[in-house]
Image (tube, rainbow, N blue to C red):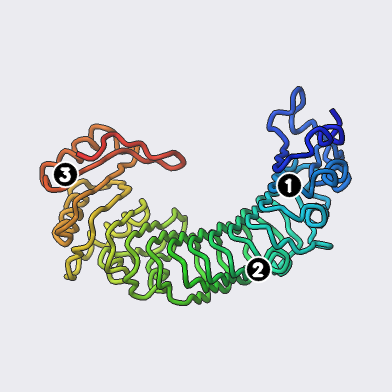
Amino acid sequence: MPSQDLVRSSRSLESVSISVEKSLGTKSYDEVEDDDDDLYLTEPGFLNEWLPAIGGGLRSISISDFWSQSSWRRSDALALISSLCNNLLELELKNTWLSVDGLNPMPKLTNLTLEFLRLDDEDLNKVNECFPGLQVLNLIGVGGLKEPKIDLKHLKICHWTISNAPLSLTILAPSLVELKLECVKPRSLVVETPSLSNLHLIIEKAEEFKMKDFLCLKSLQLESWNLFSLMGKFGSSRTIKMLAVNVPKHTESIAPTLTFEGVFDSFPNLSSLKLGPGAWSEMEALFRSKGLEDMVGMNGLKEISAHLLIDEVDTTLLFISSILKRCSNLSNMAVLVHGEVGPRIASKFVSKCRADWPRIRWRWGFWKEGTEDSWVSDWT
């Protein structure tokens, strides 16, 4: 059925979702010509066939384009949608190249997702100007940005993944409560989000990192090659109760700097701590050479979850023993052993832990790169 006839029979529509299926019938992706437009879903001519008839009643639009046909030609889809869909609340566009020329303000829009596309708005000025009511913003793999700045006073949730390396990143969002930010090496990173309670930050490093005090921050996840330096940016934060840290794998030879006592110097009121494999390895390496420094016992810590490599069983057990002596109120410890260690060694290791520290409830399983964690036992 032609698109015009389809929408004429569906004039009461409030939501439209269009995408190119991974299966193309008898054709493969390689057989589809790049210069065709039969699968070019953000092509203005295609949108004009059906959007004018139903645009005014739509509350949600989702379009996932065919990258081979959409990536090399710029689309005016945003201008068209903004002129025809005055009541739109949610907009999701993927796999295309978008112009912001002719984009009109959409004050009712609350949710915007732009994913794996090129956006001709290098500073995000048009996004800030035309979508002032956004409460949820997802920018996943958006190219074309140079010095992007999010400046949205009503924004509450943001997920921003940046694969290239813009000169600077700025987030000004007084109402933001949840932020996940993945970036590489921006020259400057500025974050002013005083209401933030949940932050997940993945970054190699930033030459300049400015942020105002996070007075409401309760949950923090950090992933960085220079984790010790990054933690120092938070001062001694007493509001954070849940912390997850990891050091990604890297080919460079970098001396370990992360210590167990350093974590609690920065975050003294933790109740839950999750240690990724890189973070645990750095901590154990420094413990092996220096031991644990004297420090005030962390009486507030209730639970630890750790991804272990177990190069030397005795050293790992001694490290755990030193931690437990300093965390008198710890009640739960979850350990995930690397899959290459083998089930027999892992089982004996956990049995030893249970025997030596019976006051602790243990949970154990296996982890491996690129797969989900596999739990063998629940809390016992």
The residue carrying mark 3 is 353
Q: Which callout, 2 or 3, points at the residue further toward the start of the chain?
A: 2
Residue at horizontal 30%, vertical 47%? 308
The residue carrying mark 1 is 58
Q: Is residue 291 visible?
A: no
The reply, left or right, for residue 184 in relation to residue 130 is left
Residue at horizontal 70%, vertical 40%? 17
- Image quarter for residue 282? bottom left
User: Measured from the top left, where is residue 165 in percent x and y?
Assistant: 62, 64
User: Measured from the top left, where is residue 68 in percent x and y?
Assistant: 77, 42
- Between 80 and 356, the one lying in front of the other is 80
Q: Secondary structure at mark 1?
A: loop
Callout 2 amino acid: Pro
- Image quarter for residue 253? bottom left
Label 1–label 3 contact, CB within 8 A: no
Q: Is residue 47 visible?
A: yes
User: Measured from the top left, where is residue 371 in percent x and y?
Assistant: 44, 39
